[in-house]
Amino acid sequence: MPKLSNRINIENRRAKFDYEFIERLTAGLVLKGTEIKSIREGKAGLADSYCFFVNDELFIKNMHITEYSEASFYNHTPLRERKLLLTKTEINKLHKKVKDSGLTIIPIKLFINDKGFAKLEIALARGKKQFDKREDIKKRDVERETNRKF
């Protein structure tokens, strides 16, 4: 059997600009058959998606996975809520931090691991203020200028 390629790497680029990451975790996803096929084609998006708790379970909302073109009437809905798979201790820890300190959980990256499973990297994050964003832009510009000189 040929080895599956894991070149799929879908990122939420806006998250780095809008949030300060405190802690990162990797979670599994509960997907339907046509959803994993669309992810393997690279047809998914993490823009405007976020995670939330329902009865001590973590779900992701607004993650767009395009309908699989080869599927018949068994296709999935693109913006459905999907359950994230984490250990009970990780879920309890995240739930406590989100409830107490006003942090949020956002998806950073969607990828296929070595075994062929879709994984989602999530982060416990705090929203940046406007002046923090300006400082990041200045640091990036200075770093870009110093790299050009050498």
Image (cartoon, grey):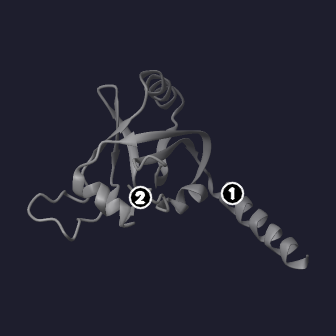
On-image quarter of the C terminus: bottom right
Residue 35 appears left or right of 24: left
| Up/down of 49 relative to 38, above or below | above
User: Viewer-proximal residue, 119 or 63?
Assistant: 119
Mark 2: which secondary structure? loop
Q: How far is disc 2 from disc 1 in space, using C-alphas? A: 50 Å
Image spot of residue 103 (x, y percent): 52, 37
On-image quarter of the N terminus: bottom left
Which callout, 2 or 1, points at the residue further toward the start of the chain?
2
Residue 143 appears left or right of 16: right
Residue for point 44% across, 39% down: 27
**Residue that protrudes farthest toward the bottom in the picture:** 149
Mark 1: which secondary structure? helix
Residue behind mark 1: 131
User: The disc labelled 1 sits on which kind of residue?
Assistant: Phe
Image spot of residue 105 (x, y percent): 47, 41
Q: How many marks?
A: 2
Residue for point 50% across, 24% down: 93
